[in-house]
Amino acid sequence: MLALSRKKGEALVVGNNIEITILEVKGDQIKIGIKAPKEVPIYRKEVYEQIQQANKEAMADQTPEAISKLFNN
């Protein structure tokens, strides 16, 4: 993991087209702004993990009967 220090108003660039800017620092919270192309999904980590878990659960029910139900309804 790369750890960087930034002050309010400072930014960093990821790749060629994602910019992360520190907007506000208040106590132990930091507000960040992210500029990225619309096709780049951005999720909070806990939401991303929930999506991944739901996808795994959906894939676990890929029996022939379950697949048949998808196409026969």
Image: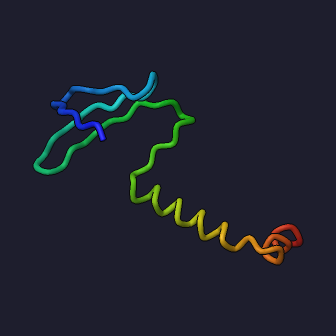
Question: Which residue in the rendered view is the most extreme toward the front?
Answer: 1
Q: Residue at x 28, y 36 (%)?
A: 2
Using the rendered view, name the quadrant where residue 20 is placed.
top left
Q: Position of residue 47 (x, y in %)?
A: 44, 58
Using the rendered view, name the quadrant where residue 21 is placed.
top left
The structure's colour scheme is rainbow
- In the rendered image, the quadrant that contains the C terminus is bottom right
Q: Is residue 52 left or right of residue 32?
A: right
> Across the whole image, how many numbered discs are drawn on residues?
0
- In the rendered image, the quadrant that contains the N terminus is top left
Q: Residue at x 37, y 35 (%)?
A: 34
Comparing 26 with 41, the one in front is 41
Q: Position of residue 22 (x, y in %)?
A: 24, 34
Q: Is residue 62 above or below residue 10?
A: below
Q: Is residue 33 left or right of residue 5?
A: right
Q: Position of residue 50 (x, y in %)?
A: 48, 63
Q: Is residue 69 left or right of residue 45?
A: right
Q: Is residue 53 above or below residue 48?
A: below
Q: Is residue 44 above or below residue 25?
A: below
Q: Residue at x 60, y 70 (%)?
A: 57
Question: Which residue in the rendered view is the most extreme toward the right?
Answer: 72
Question: Which residue in the rendered view is the most extreme toward the top?
Answer: 16
Question: Which residue in the rendered view is the most extreme toward the bottom?
Answer: 65
Using the rendered view, name the quadrant where residue 3 is placed.
top left
